[in-house]
Image (spheres, coloured by chain):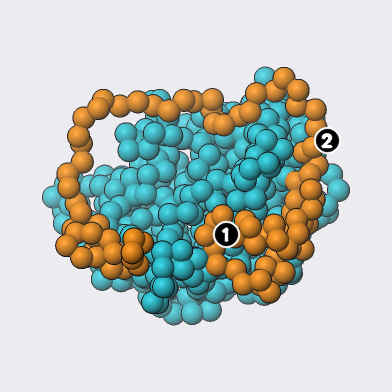
Amino acid sequence: MALEHSDVLRAAHLARLGLASQDAEAYVEDLNQILSMVDQLQQVNTDGIEPLAHPLEATQRLRADEVTESNQREHFQQVAPVTEQGLYLVPRVVE
Amino acid sequence: MSSSIALHDKTLSELAQGLEAGEYTSRELTEVFLARIERLDGELNSFITVCREEALRDADAADARRAAGKAAPLTGVPMAIKDIFCTEGVRTSCGSKMLDNFISPYDATVIEKLRAEGVVMLGKTNLDEFAMGSSNENSYYGPVKNPWDLTAVPGGSSGGSAAAVAAGLAPAALGTDTGGSIRQPAAFCGITGLKPTYGRVSRYGMIAYASSLDQGGPMARSAEDCARLMNVIAGADPRDSTSVVRGVPDYVEGLKYSLKGLKIGLPKEYFGEGLTPEVEASVRAAIKVFEDAGASVQEISLPHTHLAIPTYYVIAPAEASSNLSRYDGVRFGHRCADPKDLEDLYKRTREEGFGDEVKRRILIGTHTLSEGFFDAYYIKAQKVRRLIRQDFLDAFDQVDVLMGPAAPTPAFDLGAHKDPLSMYLQDLYTIAINLAGIPGISVPAGLAGKRPVGLQILGPHFGEQTLLGVAHQFQQLTDWHRQRPEFGQEHA
């Protein structure tokens, strides 16, 4: 399942990772080497094997549906690039 | 006050005893290490941020606490923290340009616990960007050098922590281990590093790389020091739903371990092609020490070992691509200048903020999770992961611990591995342990030329007490953990 230049650009777009077309070329060979190594997995018979999502087979712990946190908006927004009136500012998305 | 040369060579436990006995104050001790960092770290590059003012303030507070008779076992000892743990009011960069300007608004749970104990934080140590690397050459802040040989890497990704401890710039440090990032740098730098069982130590506030694999743990001069740190940092955390609700044993008590009757398994797959003869000789000599002390040794097979690296390089990048989606220039971290629209903001912020290795793993992870590839890659890897884990469960039905090398070679030269794949293969002996979630420790076990060799000891889930006990007994019978590099020894 070798990757082509267009596949790298597609993955970059899905990841919202800026990548110029000429820069993507540099990743094609690296990623194909990695995927070729990963393709060893296809040789393994895993019929009847359940995927292991958690190394201890643990399931998500539930907690009581209670408010335990206080409002720290100002504290957390001190590290934001741009805020205004308690909101995070981004470029206009609705014309 | 004792001579500063003696102090920087002492273990954390010895330093704590000296504080308790009133031989020196925490401020005096902290000043010794800060002075060494100032003199020596220009060459090593093991710290990203040095917290001089905060450390001295905390040292004074520790001295006051001791004077009031309220000291805990590690009150006043200094240590370093891998710059992947959030520390309130201090830059937490994760080795990335993306977080170069990030002053964390909160403490990770382990940092809270260390602060409550009265441990003094000297600073934040260098690492491969977002913990992605096996050499510490992927940091935005430049590579770290190995104090045993400045032409060698310290290992990664906790290479800054390992180098700082090895060079006597800190008596201990926190690291994290996703595929070997505590054990391999500990081996390369001749120190002791423990990766606990997945879920044993809280991951809250530890910047996520691959959530089902990441685990924080101690790096220090001895197993005893790691045990003392585990007594502080281990335990369930209501803020981390992946932490395990289970009683925490006294790890220091567990050091009183008898090697008589210990059953050691040697995975034959860890002694095959690619293992450097000098590393194998040191590891086998170390195992002979255990046999002479009354342990028995048998060969074990972990038949899916060769699949660990391919499995890891599906699961870890997949989880990374998800975890790193939060770096979008909106709420914290780097933001590109003058974005023309929202997509431009995301794309240019991430293009500018991430380094090559991070981009490579995001691209692989995004591809393997994308429509049409998810089952063939991700689900397949999770199935093989179960087979790898089962190998360990079967092995621990037969033996108490497994032993082998932590890495196939001693520390390699800076720049030695140009292509990513050859670098990934360096983690052959560490990576399966994270997939299985079991604990592992690396202890110094010899030298190959002037570069250290690490013996890796593995145990069943929640077997840290045994690992620390076994490693401690080894360190009572050998002095490899007492060896120091020449670097920095002429400095006070």
Q: Is residue B104 left or right of residue B410?
A: left
Question: Residue visible at 70% across and 23% down?
Answer: A49
Give B373 or A55, whichever is nearer the viewer.
B373
Q: Secondary structure at mark 2?
A: helix
Left or right relative to B69: residue B79: right
Labels 2 and 1 positioned on one and the same chain = yes
- For disc 2, the chain is A
Quick one: which chain is cyan? B
Residue A13 is labelled as: 1
Q: Position of residue B289 (x, y in %)?
A: 70, 40
In the depicted view, which residue is nearer to us: B316 or B281?
B316
Pointer 1 chain: A
User: What's the amino acid at mark 1?
Assistant: His
For the C terminus of chain B, the quadrant is bottom left
Placement of the N terminus of chain B among the 4 image quadrants: bottom left
Question: Which chain is represented by orange in the image?
Answer: A
Image position of B39 (left or right of A3):
left
Give the residue pinned by disc 2. Answer: A43
**Which image quadrant is residue B457 in?**
top right
Residue appearing at x 57%, y 59% in the figure: A13
